[in-house]
Amino acid sequence: MMHSGRRAIRHATNAGHRALRAAGLAGLLAGLLTLAACNSSETSSSGFLDDIQPADRLYNQALTDLDGGDMKNASKTLKQIDQQHPYSEYSRRAMVLQTFIHYRRREYDDAINTGKRYVSLYPGDKDAAYAQYLVGMSYYRQIPDIGRDQTVTGRAYNAMNELVERYPDSEYIEDAKTKMRIALDQLAGKEMLTGRYYLERREYLAAINRFRSVVQRFQKTRHIEEALARLTESYLAMGIVSEAQTAAAVLGHNFPESQWYKDSLALLKANGVAPQENSGSWISQSFNSPPAG
């Protein structure tokens, strides 16, 4: 988070220097607006024009507030830029800072909406990867306990995956990949929790469907060994011995030192059978093709 803050400040500071160079143009624009207000005798827009401040002045004020830790006032000032100068360069940069401020203030829904808007409007901009990263982090910070619905976890994974695919040279790639692995592990953990629930109640088919999801979608997570062992147990309980043997064989082939394999082997031996892989089984085919996740 501190890295993200420094990145936003650095972007903002560089933009601030450019804003100073653009002050002459902004001053000219302000002067023209004032002149137009003075020359108009048929409208009462002078009060409105008096409220308009140059974009560079507003932007630099927001930077000052942000640097001083006053995110509330910085956010208000950035909104003024969007309202008064919606098509300016400062409006574009203000959108990035707004995304950062929303994120730091834990206003995650606002951060997500603003970040998505930025990436949609300026997908090729140098700050687009940072905006996408903040979208992903806003989802990631909301990942709930394993026992709750994991919809936001899937969204965190998708947002970070979009960053990896669209901006492969970004400096945020490694952290994004780490967050993706954590999200996948969480999703797999939820499937395992539900599968064990069904298994304890001898609802074997429902349990198998959950463990199957882990095998097919989350092979690279730490839950894969247990998923195969639970499949061995569930299939054996249902009397589908061939699939139980295949699950144990695949487990032993890929994780020969695993305690889950040792337990599965003992379970099969207790029932008078041994691991034996059926190459036509969905289990074997899943391990011969990339996982869906």
Image: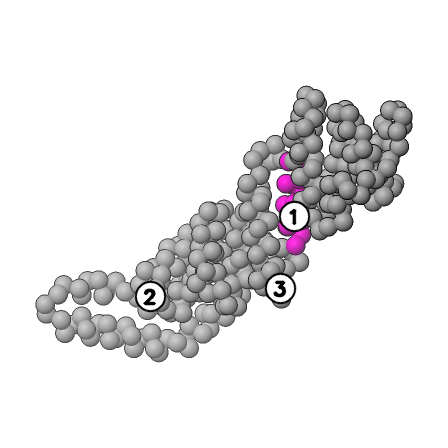
| Mark carried by residue 85 | 2
Which is more toward the observer, 63 or 266?
A: 266
Left or right relative to 230: residue 292:
left
**Label 3: few (<14), some (14–19) or many (≥20) C-alpha neighbours in 10 Å:** few
Mark 3 lies on a secondary structure that is loop
Furthest-top residue in view? 201
Residue at point 63%, 45% (across, down): 183
Give the mark nearest the N terminus, 3 or 1: 3
**Is residue 64 something one can see in this rendering?**
no
Furthest-front residue in view? 280
Residue topped by disc 3: 168
Nearest-to-viewer mark from 3 and 1: 1
Residue at point 58%, 63% (across, down): 167
Pinpoint residue 196: horizontal percent, then vertical percent. 69, 28
| Mark carried by residue 23 | none
| Mark carried by residue 293 | 1
Q: CA distance from mark 2 to mark 1?
A: 43 Å
Nearest-to-viewer mark from 2 and 3: 3
Which is more toward the observer, 32 or 149?
A: 149
Residue 92 against residue 293 in the figure, above or below:
below
Residue at point 24%, 75% (across, down): 32
Q: Main secondary structure of the magenta part?
A: helix
Task: Give the amino acid at mark 2.
Answer: His
Q: CA distance from mark 3 to mark 1?
A: 19 Å
